[in-house]
Image (tube, rainbow, N blue to C red):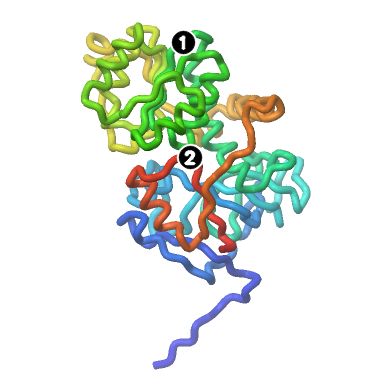
Amino acid sequence: MEINEQRLPAEQTTRALVQQSHEGPRDLTLTTDRPRPVPEPGEYLVRVGAAGVNFADVMQSRGTYGGGPQAPYVAGFEAAGEIVGAGPGVEAPLAPGTHVVGAGPGAFAQYMTMPAAGVLPVPAGWSDAQALGLVLNWATALAAVKTLGAVQAGEVVLVHAAAGGVGQAAVRLARHYGARVIGTASPSKHATVRALGADLVLDRRRPDLAAEISRRTAGVDLVLESVGQATFATSLSVAKPVTGRVVVFGASSGEATVTTHDLVFTHPVQIKGLHIGTLAVAAPSLYRSLLTELEALIAQGIYTPGTPALYPLSEGAMVLQQLEAGQTEGKLALDPWR
C-alpha cells in the first residue's frame, strides 16, 4: 500500500531538536521539517540566532522538571533572535527586525514563539549569543543574591556550582554588592571561579566541606543552593542560625528534604524557593524591577557581554549529556542554523 506523505513548504517548516522520550538527552533528534510555530495572542515569532542550554533542559529530558512538556516536544526554552512576526494583542509592540532575548517553548529550533511581555531587546552592540542568560541566568542570580537573598556589604555568601551559568553571575553580583564569596566547584574549574572574584573556592565533594567552611567563617549569611541532595545538608549547617538565608533554585544532584524539626531545632534558618518563571508570573512588578536593574548593571559595565560556548544544533544531544555529567562550565548555547 502506498503512503502519500504530506510535506509542508520549506518556508513553513523549521529545523529543530525534538526530545523523543523521557530517557534523557540521548533521545534528542534533529529534524528538518518541523512545522514553524504560529504566534498566539501576546506572542512574538522569533527567528532564533542562538539558543541557551540550561540544566532545566536536562531535567525536562528526563521528565523531572515541574510542569515540563510531555515527549515528544521541541526542546529548549531560552533564546535570542530577531522578531519576524507577532500575534494579536501585543502591547507596545517592538518593530519587526528588533533583536530580543527571552524564553518560550521550543527554543532549540530556527523559529520559536516568545511571550512578548517577557522579552528584552538585545543590548546595543551585543550579538544574540552574547545576550543569552540575561532573562534567565542573570535574572535568577540577581533574584537569589539581592531580591530574596537581601545581601549586604560585608556578608559571606556561599555559591554552589559556582562555575555554572547562574553560579558565575551570582559570584560577580555578590562581589559587586560587597560580599565575601565562597564558591564550590570541581577542582578543574577552581581557576575560573577565582577569576570571577571569589575569595575562596572549595571542592563540593570534599567530605569535610561543612567543617572547612565553618573553620574559615563565623557562619554564612547567604547560601545559593542549586545542587540539592549532595550539598543541602552542608548549606543548612553552615548558614547562620535565624539570620542565615538559603535560597534554593535547583537540585542538579537530586532532591533534598528538610523537616519541621530540622527548621525549629537543628537548622533554624530562612529557606526561600526561587523559580524565575514563577516569579515573573506571580510578581510581575518585582520581575520588571529585576530587569530594570539588570539594564542598569549593563549600562554601568558590571554586566558585560556573555561569552557562551556556541555549538551547532546537531550537537545538542552531546552538549546536554556533558552538562548532565558535570563536564561543562559557563554558559552553553546552540546555533540552530548550523
Task: Indicate the secondary structure of the residue bearing disc 1.
Answer: loop
Q: Amino acid at mark 2?
A: Gly
Instruction: Determine which of the numbered discs, if any, sits on residue 276 in the image.
Output: none
173 to the left or right of 124:
left
Q: Are marks 1 and 2 in contact (CB under 8 Å)?
A: no
Percent x, y of residue 201:
38, 24
Percent x, y of residue 255:
28, 34
Please give the residue where the numbered disc 1 appears in the rendered image: 155
211 to the left or right of 243:
left
**N-term mark: 1 or 2:** 1
Kindly tell me whether residue 225 is visible in this rendering: no
Split into 4 quadrants, where in the image is the C terminus? bottom right
Please give the residue where the numbered disc 2 appears in the rendered image: 330
Q: Residue at x 66, y 46 (%)?
A: 42
Percent x, y of residue 227:
34, 32
Mark 1 Cα shell of 10 Å, populated few (<14), some (14-19), many (≥20): some
Q: Residue at x 43, y 92 (%)?
A: 2
- 29 shown above or below 50: below
Mark 2 Cα shell of 10 Å, populated few (<14), some (14-19), many (≥20): some
Kindly tell me whether residue 30 is visible in this rendering: yes
- 310 shown above or below 222: below
Q: Residue at x 38, y 28 (%)?
A: 160
Percent x, y of residue 206:
25, 27
Task: Indicate the secondary structure of the residue bearing disc 2.
Answer: loop
Query: Gap in Å between the C-alphas at discs 1 and 2?
Result: 25 Å
Q: Residue at x 40, y 15 (%)?
A: 245
